Amino acid sequence: MTEDSGLGSNRTRDPQTAREVEAPSPPHPIGMLAELTHRCPLGCPYCSNPLALDARGSELDTQTWARVFREAAALGVLHVHLSGGEPAARRDLVEIMAAAHESGLYTNLITSAVGITTTRLAKLADAGLDHVQISIQDSEAVSADQIAHYQGAFARKKELAAAIVRLKIPLTVNAVVHRANVDRIGAMVDLAIDLRASRVEIAHVQYYGWALRNRAALMPTAEQTARAIKTVEELRERHHGKIVIDAVAPDYYARFPKPCVGGWGRRSLNVTPAGKVLPCHAAETIPGLEFWSVRDHSLADIWAMSPSFNAFRGTDWMEEPCRSCARRDIDFGGCRCQALAITGNARAADPVCHLSALHGRMASLAAAQKNAPYVYRVFELSE
Ligand code: SF4
Ligand code: FES
């Protein structure tokens, strides 16, 4: 049995001797995504939040978040990503930040920049803000604001980035790329350098949840994708020592899948605004999984014993071809949510993998491109 076989109970049966033995403990999580709210002023067509959003009235209060942070630190979590929606929509964001910091967690604020004034930023810095990640939609204002569905968002991002750098807080720029902007990766990296970011992430859209609705409108062509991969290699060489360039490979044109979330129930957890704890941000799309809430259970119990975390932990749940594949402890069969979305079976190999019998479907879905208007994700701050 491998250390990652991820059994939920403390007792299990040894397959060789058929004796009951102590089950190995699950590995410790390293990172936690704290989705403070689903409210967001932007309307990005590739929003990764679930289709059914948590209403404002169901959000966890400040004290509960403080307890969750303490429990996370005790469980071994090192960094917390305070995210949303837009975390700045929470009036108690400064108090939440202070609680995360006091728990000993490294704090990363993931923000659209809308709703954070320089005064509020200074308060967040005093409360223990360690790092900020700002998303950008394009390298120039008109297109960026059109993709974000928010007039003036681009200018706000530039202003906030400058304020972050003035406070000497490390900044990462996250550039989400798709057909409309993938040919401007070089310009987006130049923008990140101008903003004095220490890192830029080139993240091709992941097609789950809301993004699936806009897949045909967002999907880059095969030629664009090949060019983008080459461009990133050249940019890394050109800007070596100036900025770190991370790139997430575009799934639909790949031959092997990525180890989604570093392996299910292995390194990270997500807490939703209402308190449910998920192994990944799209886990609720998988029918039949039972998610436990921090309102009813400790984070340690949820991590070790909740049915959803144990459903795909380790490798015992796998079907062929993953079950006997040499890469099964490297990519963990890819993404469960993508396997479900494309094949209808969450246990199947991620069809990104060329060894999947359904791999051909990825190419035909990628080819089904249409210049349709975006269906924007609109969520009022007052909801
Ligand atoms: Fe990964 Fe499964 Fe493909 Fe092997 S068969 S490379 S484990 S997805
Ligand atoms: Fe759920 Fe990949 S997003 S496993």
Image (spheres, rainbow, N blue to C red):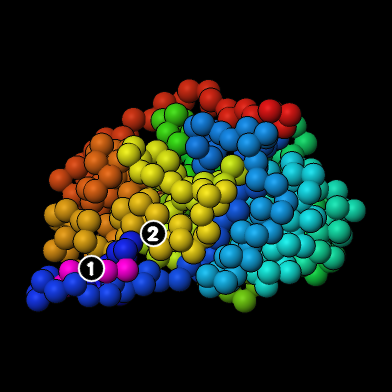
Decide if residue 173 is in sight here.
Answer: no
In the image, residue 53 above or below residue 183: above
- Residue at x-position 63% and y-position 36%: 58
Q: How many marks?
A: 2
Q: Is residue 46 visible?
A: yes
Which mark is first along the chain, 1 or 2? 1
Q: Residues within 10 Å of mark 2 (few under 14, many from 20)?
A: some
Q: Amino acid at mark 2?
A: Met
Identify the main secondary structure in magenta.
strand
Disc number for residue 77: none
Q: Is residue 109 left or right of residue 367?
A: right
Confirm if mark 2 falls within 8 A of ligand 2.
Answer: no
Q: Nearer the viewer, residue 22 or 201?
A: 22
Residue at (53%, 49%) from the top-left corner? 296
Residue, far right? 119
Q: Amino acid at mark 1?
A: Thr
Q: Residue drawn 60% across and 48% down?
A: 35
Q: CA distance from mark 2 to mark 1?
A: 13 Å
Label 1 residue near ligand 1, CB within 8 Å: no
Q: What span is colored magenta in the figure?
A: 10-14
Residue behind mark 2 = 305
Q: Secondary structure at mark 1?
A: strand
Residue 12's disc number: 1
Q: Position of residue 71 (x, y in %)?
A: 59, 65
